Image (cartoon, rainbow, N blue to C red):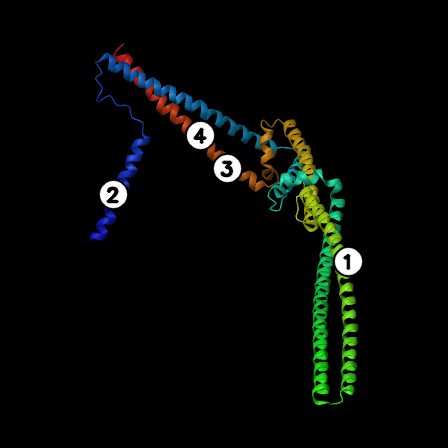
Amino acid sequence: MGFIKKILNRFKKKEETEHIYEDWEELVYRRDELMVHDRDQRREYVKNCLEQIAEATREVDSLQMEYNSITSQLKDMEEIDALPEEEHRELEEAARQIGRLEGQRSGYLKRSNRMGEAQYQKMEALADEVKEGSDKLTAAEDYQTKIRADMKRLENEKDAYLYRKHEAQRQIENLKGMSIVCVIATVLCFILLLVLQMGFGMDAQIGYLLTAGAAALVITVVFFRHTEAIRELKKVEKSINKIIQLHNAVKIRYVNNTNLLEYLRLKYGVSGAEELDKLWQQYQTEKAERDKFKQAERELEIFQRELLHILRRYQVRDPGLWLHQTAAILDNKEMVEIRHNLIIRRQSLRRRIDYNNEVVAHNAQAEIKDLAEKYP
């Protein structure tokens, strides 16, 4: 029961609300609370009625302009429908071309991959030298790769020669040590042989010869090895100096080429030749699209003038309006729909004009006349 009661209360409130809204729309002139015999209150009441008449007049003037415009459009439709067959075909052809060209223009404006205006202007200014700039960038990038490879190879060679230098130096030091050991060993052997000869009366002549021969042999080997090591060290140091000179020359070329790359990248506002080529292709596409857009704009203007010329020739009052309603010229269903919408709008305007004339202004005038008769 409670649920049903809630529903009934809801419907009751809705009816009361609708009744209030209906009261708002109904214009009622009441003098129940007016002290009619009071001259000032009558004057204020008449003033209020005059203000309502003025407001209604302004509203009617505004509505009448819109009403006349819609009536003119409906008459234009009748004129278009009454066109001779040949002229109607010309009109349809102009409307068809306008629709096609507006579609092209709309497609260009909605294109998602359009080039920015600043980028386009920059590429347009550099158009004559982009090809040369791309070739320079490509050459500089390739040369940079080769220079880096040369520098890396020289670094590796330098490391290898430094290793050989270290080995030669270590060998020289080892041979020096061996020579010292050999000399010390020879001296010790001679001392020992001398002790044996002098102290024990032994014959050490053969020992002297063997010791001297061994010492001579070892010293000769050490000498030749030491000479070879020194020759290797000088050769390696000479090669290292040559590599350093080559490395410095390559460094100079590397720095110059790096500066050239930075300048070209700054000039064209890109990170490399690949990006510049991509921008150039995008610019060419954009330029072709803009040229087509401009051509479409020129053709659109021609067909719009042709359509206006045909409509003016047959007394269409507002031909400019049909530039934006070409679909209605080509499709009768579209024309019928527009006509239906205009008729509904005109009926609505008519009701509003009648309301202001017959209800607001008329009743206010009646009130003033009634008061004037009773209180002349």
Residue bearing mark 3:
340
**Mark number displayed over residue 349:** 4
x 79%, y 73%: residue: 224
Query: Which is more foreground, mark 4 or mark 1?
Result: 1
Vertical placement of residue 45 versus 186, above or below: above
- Dot 1 amino acid type: Lys
Look at the numbered disc 2 and give the secondary structure of its residue: helix
x 31%, y 34%: residue: 22
Residue placed most toward the observer, 209 or 81: 209
Across the whole image, how many numbered discs are drawn on residues?
Answer: 4
Left or right: residue 173 versus residue 4 is right
Look at the numbered disc 1 and give the secondary structure of its residue: helix
Outermost left residue = 1
x 75%, y 60%: residue: 240
- Dot 3 amino acid type: His
Vertical placement of residue 145 versus 63, above or below: below
Disc nearer the start of the sequence (2/1): 2
**Quadrant position of residue 156:** bottom right
